[in-house]
Image (tube, rainbow, N blue to C red):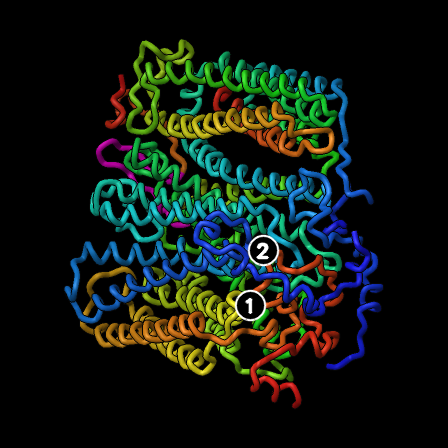
Amino acid sequence: MANEAQVATLAPIDAAHATTDRDFIQESAGIRNWLITLDHKRIGLMYLIAIIASFIAGGIFALLIRIELLSQGQTIMSADAYNRVFTLHGAIMVFLFIIPSVPAALGNFLLPIVLGAKDVAFPRLNLLSFYVYVLGAILALASMVIGSVDTGWTFYTPYSSSSDVGSQNAVIWMTGAVFVLGFSSILTGVNFIATIHKMRAPGQHWKRLPLFVWATYATSVIQVLATPVLAITLLLLIMERGFGLGIFDPRLGGDPVLFQHFFWFYSHPAVYIMILPGMGVVSEIIATFSRREIFGYMFVAMSSVALALVGFLVWGHHMFTSGQSEYATMVFSALTFLVAIPSGVKVLNWVATLYQGQIVLASPMLYGLAFIVLFSIGGLTGLFLGTLSVDIHLHDTYFVVAHFHYVMVGGTVFAFFGGLHYWWPKMTGKLYDETLAKVAFWVFFVGFNWTFLSQFILGSRGMPRRYYDYLPQFEDLHRFSSIGAFIIGVGILLMLVVFIRSLVGGAKAPPNPWGSAGFEWQTSSPPPLENFSRTPVMTRGPYDYHLATEAELYSGFPEDFQKSRNP
Amino acid sequence: MSTAHTDAAAASHDSGHSHAAHDDHGSHGPKFLAHHFDTPVQQFDTAKLGMWLFLAQELLFFAGLFVAYGIYRSWYPDDFSWASHQLDRFMGGANTIVLLFSSLTAALAVRSAQLGTRKQTSVLLLVTIVCAFGFLVIKFFEYQHKFHAGLLPGNLFNPDIHHLSASTQGLPIPAHGGSFFGIYFMMTGVHGLHVIIGIGVIFWIWLRNQRGEFTSEYWTPVDLVALYWHLVDLIWIYLFPLLYLID
Amino acid sequence: MSAHPSHDHDSHDDGAVHAHISSIRLYVGIFLALIFFTVVTVGLSLIHLGPLNLAIAILIATVKAALVVTFFMHLKDDNRFNALIFVGSLLFAGVFLAYTLNDTGRRSEVERMQGAYVNDATGERAPGGPPVVERAVQPGAGAAHGGH
C-alpha cells in the first residue's frame, strides 16, 4: 500500500505508465481472448457490435414497412407478411436494441472508468449476461426461421395465446427469446447497482458521480424490479399457449386485460429503461460542450431516480380503452402527469446549462441538442395521450406511433449515437471525420422529422396504427413519411461510413480530445486493461471546470476547439 | 477557468475518504481476493449486495404469480375454497416442516463456515440437500394424485369425482377450478424449480467446501447460497397457507 | 481502502470481514418458533372466521417470514441498504397488486355498459363484471369443464 497513491489525482496518466502499459485492445489479441474476456471494456464493445447489428436488422424491417405503405393495397408484401414485419421491427428494436443500447454497451464501457474502478463488481456475471443476450438473439432468430410472430411486440392475449396464424409456435420461440433477454437485462442491472455502490474510488462520493452514472443507477433499479415481472408474464403466456392455464385466455375463464396489466407493469418502466440512460448521456454531452458545470446537478440526478420510481405507477395509461375500471383509469391518468415534472426539470436544467456556456457545436453536441428538442416534442405529445378524453380519440393511431418514436428515436437513439460519437475516441483510440459526421447528423435529423411529424398528422386525422391498408385521403402523408424513412436510412449509412473510415484510417486520439473535465478523459485513449495505472483519488467533480487544470482539460484537441477556449 | 489548484490541497480536502490504496499488481492480499477489489470486506459487501439485489428480482418474479392468485381468488372465492380442499394439508404441512428444517441447517452451515469447521459445514450442507430431495419427493406424490384425479390447469381440468376430497362430496364442480389449478401448478412448479436449482447450487458449494476453498476468513459463497435457500423457504411460507389452507 | 465510505458498517481498518456469529441456541429457537407458527396457522384454518381467515393466515406468514429474514438471513446485522432493497421490492410488489386489484375489482362501476359480458352458451359472466349475486353454477354447466 504505497502512500503515493493517496496524492495521485486525476492528472493524466504519468508518462512512465502510459508508454509501458498497453491499452486494452492490444493487451491480448485474438478472437478467443475476446470471447472469454472478463474486461468490461471488451464486453461493452462486443455488446456494441451486437446491438448495432440488431439496429440494422430492425431498421431494414422499418424500411420494409414504409415501402409497403407507399401506396394503398398491396405494394410489396401480403397482409400476413406485413404483420410479421412490423412485429419483428418492434420486438427487435425494443428488446434487442434499445433496452441494452446505452446501458449494456456504453454503460459497460464507461461505468467502471468514471468510478475509478478496475472493473464492474461481478466481471464473470457481466460476461454471462452478454452470452445470455446472444442466446436470446439466437432464439429470436429461430422464431423468424420457424415462421415469425405476428402479434405485435406487445404479445397481447388472447391473440398471442390462441392464434394459429404465422405458424407452429413462433410465439413461444419469440416470447422465450424475450424471457431470456430479460435475464440478461436483470443481470446487468444487478451488476451495475453493486458496482456503483461498492466500487467507487476514494473521493468519488455520491455528489461527484457523473450524471450518466446516476441515470444508469436509476435504470438498473428498474431493470432489477420490473424485468422479472415480464419474465413471469411471458412464462404464463407460454404455459397458457402450451397447456391452457386459464389465466389470460377468456375461453377458459381467464382475463386478457390482466395480461396487459402484467405486460405494462414491466413495459412502462421499461420505457424509462430506454430513455433514462439517454438522458444521462445528454447530460454529459451538454456539460462538456458548454464548458460549464451542469445547472442544478442534484436536481438532474434526483429527477432520474424520481422518473424511475414514478414510472412504476403509471402503467395503466396504456390501457385507457381496454375496458379497465374507470377508477383505475382516472388514477393512472392523474399520475401520468407527475412524470412530466422530473422530465421538465431535466430539460430546464439542460437549457440553463447552455445559458452563458461556451458552446461548441461538435458532432456529439448536435445530437445532444437534437435530443432536447425532439424529446420535448415527444414528451409533450405524451401529455395529450395521458389525457383521458383526448386519448380516446388518439389511442392506437399513428399519433401514438409518432409520439413514442419521438421519445425512443428522437430521444434514446439520438442520445445513443451522440454518446457513440462522444466516446468513440475513448473506446477505439481513433478520431473520426467531424465534417462528415455532422453531415450524417443533419441528414438523420431532417429525415427523422420528415418521417414522424407527418405521422402526428396522420394519427390526429384517424389513421390507425399497425394497419396494412388505408383510405385514399392518407396516401399523401404516408408517402411523405416513407420518403423520410429513406432519408434516415441514408443518414445512418453515412454515419456507419464515418465510423468505418475512422477504424480503418482514423488519426490516433489524444486522451482528452474534447477538452472535457469528465473522469473518463483523464486516462489514455483507449484505456489500459485496468483503466488507471493506479487507483485514482478523485479530487473534484466531473463538471468542475473551474477546478480542472489546463493540463487536465486540454491534453490535445482538434484545432477548432482551441478558439472556443479563449472567448 | 485557470484557478490555481494543487493536488495536495485537493487531497487534504478529501482526506476523510481516501484510505491507502492498492497500486501494485504483485502484492494484492489474500488468494481469495479478486483482482478488482481492494479489500476482503469490499468484496464481501459487494457480493452480499449483489445477492440481495438478485433476491429482490426473485421476489418480483414471484409477485406476478401472487397477483394472479389475488385477482382470481377475489373473482372466484368459492371455486378457490373448493379447489383448496382437494389439496392434501398433511403433505403440505409436512413439506413446510421439511423446508423450515432445511433452512435451519442452511443457517447453521453458514455459522459453521464462519467458524471454519469444514467437516461440520459439509455435513450441514448435505442435510440441507437431503431435505430438499425430501421436499421434492412429497411434492411428487402430491402431483401424482392431482394428475390422477384430473385436477389440472385450465382446459385440462376434468375432475374424477371418485378421487375428490371427502369434504367436498356433494358440492358441484366449480366452473373455475381450472384457474386455481393453473395458478397452483405455476406457483408450486416455479417454486419446485427453485428447489431443484437450489440442490444443484448447494451441491456445488459442498464440493468447493470439500476442496477446502472456504476458511474462517472466506466463506462468502456459503453465505450467499444460504440466502438463496432461505428465500425459497420464504416463498413457501406464503404458498402453504394461500394454497392449502383456504377456508 | 474502502470504496464506499457511507455504507460500510462492517468495515474496519484492516479491511477484513468481521462476521456477526449467532449462537446455535438462537437458530434452533427461531426454528421452533417457525414450527409453532406453522401449527397455529393450520389450526386456525380449521376455524371458520370468514374473511378474517385470510388476514390471519397472511399475518402469521408475515411473522414467520420476518423471523427468517431477520435471523436466518442476518438482515438484523447486515448493511441497512440490503434491508432497504428487500423492503423496497416488497413495496413494488404491493403497488403491482394494489393497482391491479383496483382495476379488476371495480370494473364497470361507473359505466355499466363496459366490462359486463355474458357468455351466451353458458350464461356465465366474463370476469371483472359487476358483482355477481347468483353464484350457483349447475354441475356440468361449464361446457368446457365436463362436470361429472
In the shown orientation, is residue A541 left or right of residue B135?
Answer: right
Query: Which quarter of the figure has residue C46?
Result: top right
Q: Is residue A39 above or below residue A61?
A: above
Q: Secondary structure at mark 1?
A: helix
Where residue B10 sits: x, y (%)? 81, 67
Please give the name of the residue rendered at 73% of the width and 43% of the height, measured from the top-left corner: B29
Q: Would you say residue A188 is visible in this rendering? A: yes
Q: Amino acid type of disc 2?
A: Ala
Image: magenta residue range: C110-130
Q: Would residue A475 appear left or right of A546 to someone viewing this image?
A: left
Look at 63% across and 16% down and name the residue there. Answer: B123
Side of A561 where B176 appears, left or right: left
Distance CA(mark 1)–CA(mark 2): 24 Å
Residue C117 falls inside the magenta stretch: yes
Q: Chain of mark 1?
A: A
Question: Amino acid type of disc 1?
Answer: Lys
Residue A412 in percent (x, y) is at 46, 65
Query: Residue A399 in magenta?
Result: no
Quick one: quadrant of the C terminus of chain C? top left
Q: Nearer the viewer, mark 1 or mark 2?
A: 1
The verdict on a common chain for dots 1 and 2 is yes
Subunit of label 2: A
Say if residue A108 shows up in the picture.
no
Mark 2 and mark 1 in contact (Cβ < 8 Å)? Answer: no
Q: Residues within 10 Å of mark 2 (few under 14, many from 20)?
A: many
The tag on residue A426 is 1
- Looking at the image, which is closer to me, C137 or C5? C5
Look at mark 2 in the image and give the residue it sits on. A218
| Residue B123 left/right relative to A137 | right
Q: Tell which circle, 1 or 2, labels the residue nearer the N-terminal end.
A: 2
